[in-house]
Image: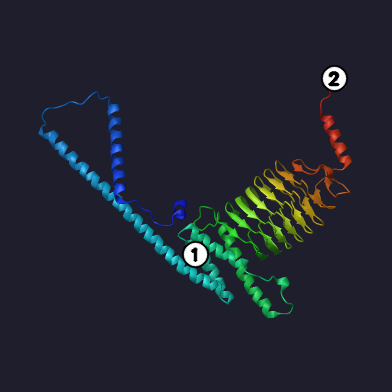
Amino acid sequence: MTSNSPRQQRRSGLRLWPVGPVLSLAFFTAITVASVVFYAGWDLLGVQGIKTERRLDSSTLFDLVKLSFGVVAGAGALVALIVAYRRQRVDEDGALRDATRLHTERFTAAVGQLGDGFAAVRLGGVHALAGLADDAPTRELRQTCIDVLCAYLRLPYTAETDLPEGDVAARHEYLALREVRHTVIRLVRDHLRHPPEHPRSWQGHDLDFTGVVFDGGDLSHSSFSGGNVSFVDARFSSGISFMSARFSGAHVDFTDATISGGISFMDARFSSGTVWFVNAKLSSGGISFTNARFTGGSITFASARLTGGVINFVRTRFNGGAIHFVNARSNSGAIIFSDAGFGSTTIDFSSALFGADALSFSDGSSDPSTGIRWPVPPGIRIPRSWAPASITSDATRARAATQPQSPGD
């Protein structure tokens, strides 16, 4: 496979058994295998016994001498093989130590560039760290480079809306810093677009964006096939795109995130894994799942707060997985399922509290008391109290009309 195989990832140093036990084990194994082969051949040939001779002729004696020398030669070859194997392991471990030492030196230089006062030098440090991650001799060293890039995004950052008005120097510094930060996001995206078997793929690694301020960014066409991706407590002041992204095994966490600029999952595919928006706050903008496809996995909006903005499921197709809005609250936001196709996906609104016009489905009438449009498609769990009496009565009569009547009714 690739250079970051599980055995290489876990190996922290060279571990070799003493030569004596290894040789004893090798000889015992060789004798055992030879005995098994001998007795298997004995059984297959149907031998009843061994013909004995009181005297050895010269031919038989010569065969015994050759056998003796063959055994000695085989034992020597076995010893040579074990010694050569140990030498190879020592050489490999030495090469790994040399590569690690060189990696550490380059890593120190790249981190020093990230702390430079000039944005151009910091950009060079970002690209150097990404290159180091690609060349890392072990998975742990690659993860360290990724952690530093993510930590750079977690550093204090003033968004454009918070800049002092008329301060040209502050705006120039902001634009330079934003260019460096967006370069980090772009490099993460490019590496997540590689298939898992690609030697430069970052799929399966952890990405920690906890508390990061996102004033834009593009993670479109990325694949999240493993690992943990944390956007916990992040602030999205401008739109960020997950367009055509693939979610197939990773845990992507937006818990406590504040969304005022919008997140797009247009054309995304959800086949496994989890995406959490637990206790997220949506004040403006929106979260768009337009044309997304759900065939597995789950998205959780438990205890989310919508004080504005829209969660949009326009033309979304649901054929598996689950979406949870348990205990979600909406004061002026909305959740729209316009032209959505509902299959086996479960959408749970248990204990949710929405205001007028908060939840709508296509091709239905609207309840003036709640703003919910009816009929609700199958597979969607809503509190019984949401259904108006007229809708409930019509549904009851419809079910009764389809049931067979007994004779005499």
Q: Is residue 397 visible?
A: yes
Q: Whole-percent x and y of residue 307? A: 79, 59
Q: Is residue 215 visible?
A: no
Q: Whole-percent x and y of residue 174? A: 66, 74
Residue appearing at x 35%, y 55% in the figure = 89
Outermost residue toward the top?
408
Colouring mode (rainbow / by chain / secondary structure / one colour): rainbow
Placement of the C terminus among the 4 image quadrants: top right
Q: Amino acid at mark 2?
A: Pro
Pointer 1: what residue? 132
Q: Which mark is residue 254?
A: none
Residue appearing at x 18%, y 40% in the figure = 68
Q: Amino acid at mark 1?
A: Leu
- Other residues around mark 1 within 10 Å, as few (<14) / some (14–19) / many (≥20): many
Under circle 2, the secondary element is loop
Pointer 2: what residue? 407
